[in-house]
Image: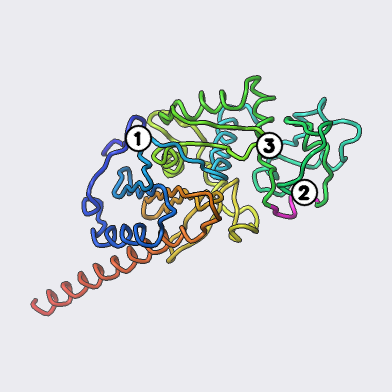
Amino acid sequence: MKKAYYPTKYWKKTSPESKNVNQEIIDSINKMVIKDFSHIKSFIIIKEDTIIYEKYLKDYSENSLHETACIFKSFLSAVIGIALQNCLIESVDKKIIDIFKEEMSENSDENFTKIKLKHLLTKTSGIEWPSPNYEFPENKRYNDIRLPFSLKIKNEPGEVFEYNPDPHILYYIIEKLSGIDFVSYADKNLFSYLGIENYVWNTDFFKRECLLMKTRDIAKLGYLYLKNGLWGEKQIICPEYIKESITKQVDGGEPENTSYGYLWWITEYNNYKCYYACGYGGQYLFIVPELELIFVITSELDEPHPENKLLVKEFLRMIKSSNKTIKGDKDTKMMFNLKAE
């Protein structure tokens, strides 16, 4: 049995044909990128364990760091999976009040006692977060767990999906339980194994930039999930958590309007099941398990750019069409062989 390859030091590159992908499909995608997607900064397609297409535009290169926007949330989900694997967290059903007994003040909404880690992972905490442009008064501009505890609960926890900053609370949970800052915990328990060294992760509530990373390193998270949490000889995340993360937990709403797992979106294109992470500006990490495909797109932050998903959809459409043609050719040959006999 062939030993699995892990791109800890580098990704392998090969021709599309060596991975049974028609070069014409790649050429077509490349033309689309150049002609109609000038806002894209980088685009990688990985088949199985190897890069079959890699494009950088606007003077970006494989060494450039890109703002991933809300892709960081899927990395955050992975860190929670690691904390479960390492028994730092007992269960996603753990109530946050059991972690922050001293931090919850007498003025905190009593419904905080109902919020579980699972609600933070599925964006169903029910917390009434202010709008992104809201300016907190100086005496309430907390950059720690006091900020969410100063807010009200408007929905029953677990019932309503809202694309709010719920995941930020997970930073403080890791710090509280581990006794070290979140980035140090993530670096030691996730990035060091994946060989990710050059990155910036900002956990500040009030700064726009979150996780800056190389395109190839973003893809490593997709590969970790394709391998059910295994990296080399190390089971980083338990397979059960991986499965729950990419299985529908709630009906997701804006901005993607599709099913939602544990900080992962879930959908289906051309009858291929996919799960993905995304961020403002058209940042995408797509995984298609059936085909062992990973797509990473980084893009300008000038507007949402949801049209970047069309590149993934078109690739899968052409793959589906190509597979039908190949099957048709095989069936025809079999028919003629039978007639000859």
Q: Is residue 194 above or below residue 152?
A: above
Task: Look at label 2 and name its amino acid.
Answer: Gly
Instruction: Check whether the beta carbons of the residues at disc 2 and disc 3 lie within 8 A of each other.
Output: no
Camera-nearest label, 3 or 1: 3
Residue stretch in magenta: 156-162
Position of 284 with respect to 42 (left or right) is right
Element type at marker 1? loop
Q: Residue at x 34, y 29 (%)?
A: 9
For disc 1, the neighbor class at 10 Å (few under 14, some 14 to 19, many from 20) is many
Give the image quarter of residue 20: bottom left
Task: Look at label 1 and name its amino acid.
Answer: Tyr
Element type at marker 2? loop
Camera-nearest label, 1 or 2: 2
Please tell me whether residue 158 belongs to the stretch shown in magenta.
yes
**N-term-proximal mark, 2 vs 3:** 2
Q: Is residue 339 above or below residue 55?
A: below
Q: Could you give the CA–CA distance between mark 1 and mark 2, rounded to whole angstroms?
A: 40 Å
Q: Name the residue under label 3.
A: 206
**N-term-proximal mark, 1 vs 2:** 1
**N-term-proximal mark, 3 vs 1:** 1
Q: Could you give the CA–CA distance between mark 3 and mark 1, rounded to whole angstroms?
A: 36 Å
Q: Mark 2 points at which residue?
A: 126
